[in-house]
Amino acid sequence: MSGFGTLFRVTTYGESHCKSVGCIVDGCPPGMELTEADIQPQLSRRRPGQSKLSTPRNEKDQVQIQSGTENGLTLGSPIGMLVHNEDHRPNDYSETDLYPRPSHADWTYIQKYGVKSSSGGGRSSARETIGRVAAGAIAEKILQKANNVEIVAFVSSIGEIAMDRNPTDPKFQNLLNTITREEVDGVGPIRCPDPTVRDEMVKVIEKYRDAKDSIGGVVTCVVRNCPVGLGEPCFDKLEATLAHAMLSLPATKGFEFGSGFYGTQIPGSKHNDMFVFDEERKTLRTKTNNSGGVQGGITNGENIYFSVAFKSAATISQEQETASYEGASGVLAARGRHDPSVTPRAVPIVEAMTALVLVDQLLIQKARDAGRLIVSN
Amino acid sequence: MSGFGTLFRVTTYGESHCKSVGCIVDGCPPGMELTEADIQPQLSRRRPGQSKLSTPRNEKDQVQIQSGTENGLTLGSPIGMLVHNEDHRPNDYSETDLYPRPSHADWTYIQKYGVKSSSGGGRSSARETIGRVAAGAIAEKILQKANNVEIVAFVSSIGEIAMDRNPTDPKFQNLLNTITREEVDGVGPIRCPDPTVRDEMVKVIEKYRDAKDSIGGVVTCVVRNCPVGLGEPCFDKLEATLAHAMLSLPATKGFEFGSGFYGTQIPGSKHNDMFVFDEERKTLRTKTNNSGGVQGGITNGENIYFSVAFKSAATISQEQETASYEGASGVLAARGRHDPSVTPRAVPIVEAMTALVLVDQLLIQKARDAGRLIVSN
Amino acid sequence: MSGFGTLFRVTTYGESHCKSVGCIVDGCPPGMELTEADIQPQLSRRRPGQSKLSTPRNEKDQVQIQSGTENGLTLGSPIGMLVHNEDHRPNDYSETDLYPRPSHADWTYIQKYGVKSSSGGGRSSARETIGRVAAGAIAEKILQKANNVEIVAFVSSIGEIAMDRNPTDPKFQNLLNTITREEVDGVGPIRCPDPTVRDEMVKVIEKYRDAKDSIGGVVTCVVRNCPVGLGEPCFDKLEATLAHAMLSLPATKGFEFGSGFYGTQIPGSKHNDMFVFDEERKTLRTKTNNSGGVQGGITNGENIYFSVAFKSAATISQEQETASYEGASGVLAARGRHDPSVTPRAVPIVEAMTALVLVDQLLIQKARDAGRLIVSN
Amino acid sequence: MSGFGTLFRVTTYGESHCKSVGCIVDGCPPGMELTEADIQPQLSRRRPGQSKLSTPRNEKDQVQIQSGTENGLTLGSPIGMLVHNEDHRPNDYSETDLYPRPSHADWTYIQKYGVKSSSGGGRSSARETIGRVAAGAIAEKILQKANNVEIVAFVSSIGEIAMDRNPTDPKFQNLLNTITREEVDGVGPIRCPDPTVRDEMVKVIEKYRDAKDSIGGVVTCVVRNCPVGLGEPCFDKLEATLAHAMLSLPATKGFEFGSGFYGTQIPGSKHNDMFVFDEERKTLRTKTNNSGGVQGGITNGENIYFSVAFKSAATISQEQETASYEGASGVLAARGRHDPSVTPRAVPIVEAMTALVLVDQLLIQKARDAGRLIVSN
């Protein structure tokens, strides 16, 4: 289904070749200043065609708010938003008439739905994420107002070129403490804050682009200033809903939270985040943060950080030996140019999904807090 | 919240020190043979105290079906199940009166709920998983009947000792094709099918046990014979709901699906799973399976496989320098013996959550299939 | 929240004065022929301005499908639909700047949301039902294909003028067996099939129109050919979800199912619907149908019928002695002409909500049926 | 499905002949004093066997809290509760082996589930309401603490004997303002506060009891001190969720909110609740309350009141000419004594469902309130 969230719920619609793509955001608190100008920046950040590294399709993607605001203020009612599909070019996809694209969703969509759409993969199109990003921009604004929450994602690896993201390395933790979205974008379309690997990453992408191939990568995301107490045991632990959100993005293959897979190798005595009293904030904090800001599924006020693996894009323009829908062996060559690495463009999408998860959990916890206040009298 | 699933929905209850733990399974199809004997085996597999490797608490964990069956057949009505808590020993936890256990949920629970339970972490207790495993056993039985679905999880790494799980390695893919639950259990409590690393894994656990420390690991799981077409684009892709399920388990830090993080390093031309016609089954299949049996969020009939990272257990009996609830620096030493590695015991829990995800998606897709049949007339 | 349904889910957006109103229909089965022509007729039936009995605002309400279909076939993906708001005229509502309209939602919206919209009642506008009717038209088409389900609503009372709807009266039951939508519309805008009261109803409405007043009424609805077995015990009994759907419509004050309130006066021995074997259909049926086609929350194949009370419209153009937002006593007189009775226009809206309930329950039961088939092998 | 509510969610289980019936209450705020003593009174009020008017089965129905509380305080975790089934006597139901009981759920359950349970109607048993009443008692306690919310239901008609419940009658409104649960119970098992009809009601019930027949009735319920602003436009208007809740109760056939069906006959000019400034409370209030305390689906602080129709009980001990499962005409005579009117026993069940609806909407609105505070800064 195409809805996500409980009290702050986004429902999206749209394929790549229909009239528009968009979403309904239900549960946005009333009285917030909101115009298209709050939403467009993140949509523009996810847009393809921003550099020689990415696909040159010039999608304009101007969002139009349909409802839920008046005089620049949210009403509390559902916010309908849409972006027109302007640049159809369905001919580019005509090869899908004969061949299901390997590792794309053409074949499974037909198996599931029994209908072949001109775009092949229907909702698996990257354009489906437009609705998510638009909704995420609203969520982010709420979070900023709630607690000055900051969400910053960046590219941490491309192919084999990886910046260090060892959770026990103070340099990495320091980066998490300070990195800004401006810094991420400031280094160009690669969106990797580490100067020691950045150029190599660009070269790797160019190499695969020139080879009509593609390469994957990892996006790491940090959330600072997240309120304490978010996350709902037991099935909706914060990391569980984040994992759900991230793995619902096209082309994702993995999710690491806090210390991640590497954390399995650190003995408990070192992995445990010892408590210490923070005199300034007058609260317990932890000396280290292998937990990634969550214990028992509940935020503890430390930085939340996690990484998401994006596989190499399935759509490549080199010839592929595969089989047709009919079962005949053959060679498929996608026409046109295709994005050799979707990873940098995934940055604002990861941020959007993070915001959607957090704002929903925030509102749920606000209800809990109020309930607790009520019953403890 | 404590519910999971849409058409097959489990709701769990219970902490470690209350009268019982259990669950309600709503949406089980009627007319299925079901008694406690179908459920107990997986509960027994998750029980602690099965070997010198794990904690010696002898929890008996006998499940009692309360409702929803009659004469050994399911009625279609909710199946209530419970397991009495027999072995309280709250004194073992008395240190939590003064100190929040590091990297445990004691402190975040108090922040969230404002109430301190005798168990500290409340629902973050491993006993909460009893309800999941009981429900999962029912889900598994349905899946077996549906398509002879086989779900087998096993330990693939302990600390730094890892078996090879390179998705492009035919040996690994062959293991996924053939491994059985009997084989996994047959090698002893370590539950690792790879003889080349198994003994070392045991040694590693023993080392950390002797050091009053703990060590993490990875559980890998394969699903064979999964029907084609399961998974709901866009937010409830199969891998997204699996990620949600897995990261909702205590102590999890990561999730890899199919090629996982390694898949980000394989260029698209090699990562793409080319199609080939299977003459025997009269269907397209893929030559390789880097996708992990899912494309565009929808199962394609190949093996589903994924891995879950479990951090080193937070509860260790060596002294830890931390702070008390009041903020005073001090030393906490957990009394009693504690499980040096929860990873092997996680095997049936991972299987249970997998089954819960799949049976729910199966029923949803059955509704889709029926709908499609209706409207295409 | 603005979503309704589980497997067939509609989410609506839009107030009366924003750019557009619309909805997303998630879960429509793929492969069904669907164009705007399937949806427009019911939208036109709900449109105001159809006669001298109703408000003369000429809303055009042309629906535009945004997504989810291609070449006239549903894809299985979400169907976005919208209707532009063309006829704003917010000046008509300027009196709401000073006075909350009595028995309208102006005041409660401000209490709930803290924001005053130009339309006053925000989502309580009748235009919000456009999304429901559009979605309902799709639902109806599925139901027709499923089992030739027929849903026909009609006006059964206006003010004190009521047609006989005694459930034990064979004439009434016969009407339920035969009434068609064409007959309902054929008698003019009053939409009451009973010629003995129809003219009086029109006169009553005219009387209140001339008095700048309004009058309520009752809409009765019958569903024929509903499949057996729909409805989910215990909280989502068919009549419960229908009641939810109907009372979610603006201006509704009551719901009767089957024998309704009158059924409380019929002793069990007469109220009970005795079984009889239907030789033709080779199934048990009931001799009478006081149950309204449902027993224990589950459809039994007999006609489903129920009635919905619509209060007299709150917006009237005569002067009302009330208080301003500030608390000052005063007189409010709505400008412009207003609909003296919304009841006839409610007919297609009741049909739409009925279809939404039934198609969702149908798909859920199809999953149950499939599950039962699976496990009983 | 067997779950109800979003942030305060109850899931029930149990048929009449299984080991226990019970529920899980998820989302109860932490830190509230709660023991079985808070829950038992309402369970005892719903128990049969309280008078000569009702069935003599002496069900003890002692509730046991399984989880979610410690030292008499709620933890915030799910509260498991159960009541053992002690008094099975399945032989009483052996007639259902041959005959589906008319207007009972025996036949529809078999159609839906394909399985016949010994109790016939499975979850349609009145014992299913035990879980609801237990959960409702917790909900009520929260509401009392929130705003001293008072929920009082009473019998307003039995068969044709009805007390006046004309919404425009000040006497009726005054009754709603003052009636207490003690007064309702104080008049004996008939639970009707109106002395002018009470004795007649008892006689009617006795008449039907002696005739081995049954008779229905109406339960009216008032909620005082409900906070302003509860109810979620558009699908989850307060009256819609109440209607859903009430029609989900066994044997219900109708629901009237505020002025109800009678309200369709009152012209708008009289039906509209004019505003007036309340000097004491410093707020707008309404002079009349035909709206039943809700406008646009949102509570306005006036009394909420509504009525629920309960049909004559289907189980009667006189002979009924009906057909067997096999289709053979025959005569069914239920053994044992049966409740001639379930209406008085429905009183605490109606109160429980009311509390469940309100507490869920209260918590949702608390999240909205908090959200609004956040974003308006």
Image: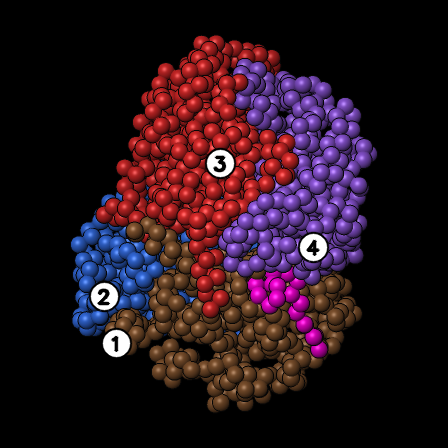
Chain colours: A blue, B brown, C red, D purple
| Residues marked 1 and 2, same chain | no
**Residue D92: image tag:** 4
Magenta segment boundaries in residue numbering: B58-74
Q: Chain of mark 1?
A: B
Q: Is residue B61 magenta?
A: yes
Q: Is residue A86 magenta?
A: no
Secondary element at image label 3: strand
The residue labelled by disc 2 is: A325
| Residues marked 4 and 1, same chain | no
The residue labelled by disc 1 is: B279
Determine the CA span between mark 4 and mark 1.
Answer: 60 Å
Residue A109 drawn above or below residue C252: below
- Residue type at mark 1 is Glu
Question: In terms of depth relative to the viewer, which is nearer, A335 or A157?
Answer: A335
Tell me what residue is drawn at x 46 percent, y 58 percent: C369
- Residue type at mark 4 is Asp
Tell me what residue is drawn at x 17 percent, y 54 percent: A91
